[in-house]
Amino acid sequence: MKIFIDTADLNEIRRAARAGLIDGVTTNPSLMAKVVGEANVADYMKEVSDAVDGPVSLEVLAQDTQGMVSQGRDLAKIGDNVVIKVPLTEDGLVACKQLRASGIGVNVTLCFSPSQALLAAKAGATFISPFVGRLDDISHQGMELIAQIREIYDNYGFDTEILVASIRHPLHFVDAAMIGADIATVPPAVLWRLLSHPLTDRGVEAFLKDWEKAELRVPTMQETRS
Ligand code: G3P
């Protein structure tokens, strides 16, 4: 399963990319609004697209097809790795078709049902973004939607990639991988939690203590070669 980071925070994106943990980035207007501040928005987006070797989703704000296509074409000029995020509406699906016809990658976002996901795949979406956390919030099983979409896409051989979004905790991530989602997009706080385990920390601490207790030193390069 590929891992994307779900943030527009450049420090977090660069840190995760340096650690080799991520295959791409997803943003949305809310995430952008949190971090852009006084910066020029297009310049900021360019920095995000340069920060990672993989797809970077940038979302349109227009709600009509023409506006989405025009904004999408402009955003796509920011970098070769830019993918345009459009909402799962009638206008969004038409925009998806048109952008795909001109060779631009499209992430259809705000998906909450299997029928929506099927229609997005038929419109040629590169990625479908079902929001699991927001479904859980209203007492639905977000992960059930991922399993349904997986089955439907496999039934018909759609190559739209399932990008699990609105991930709130490590269990969402593990469930996405168990179901066979293509990608999980993970907020930074969850990404770092995926990595850490108290038993790992305790183990490292105990190894070092035992080594010091025995008053050993680390062998030099020369010693290890002989
Ligand atoms: O990628 C979409 C995601 O950012 C939405 O997450 O936590 O706002 O539902 P959330």
Image (cartoon, rainbow, N blue to C red):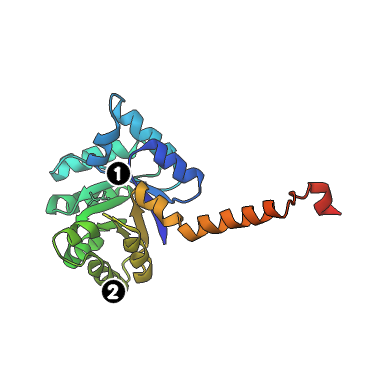
Residue type marked 2: Glu
Q: Which mark is residue 212?
A: none
Vertical relation: 114 (above or below) 204? below
Please state which of the two labelled residues, at mark 2 or mark 1, is closer to the viewer: 1
SS at mark 2 in the image: helix
Q: Quadrant of residue 75?
A: top left
Q: Residue furthest bottom?
A: 155
Locate the C terminus and report the quarter of the image it occupies.
bottom right
Q: Nearer the viewer, residue 212 or 122?
A: 212
Residue type marked 1: Thr
Q: Nearer the viewer, residue 209 or 160?
A: 209
Residue shown at the point (44%, 50%) measured from the top left: 22
Q: Quadrant of residue 139?
A: bottom left
Q: CA distance from mark 2 to mark 1?
A: 27 Å
The residue labelled by disc 1 is 27
SS at mark 1 in the image: loop
Vertical relation: 15 (above or below) 203? above
* Residues at discs 2 and 1 in contact (Cβ within 8 Å): no
Tell me: is circle 2 under 8 Å from ligand 1.
no
The reply to whether residue 193 is in sight is yes
x then y, percent, for residue 34: 26, 35
The residue labelled by disc 2 is 151
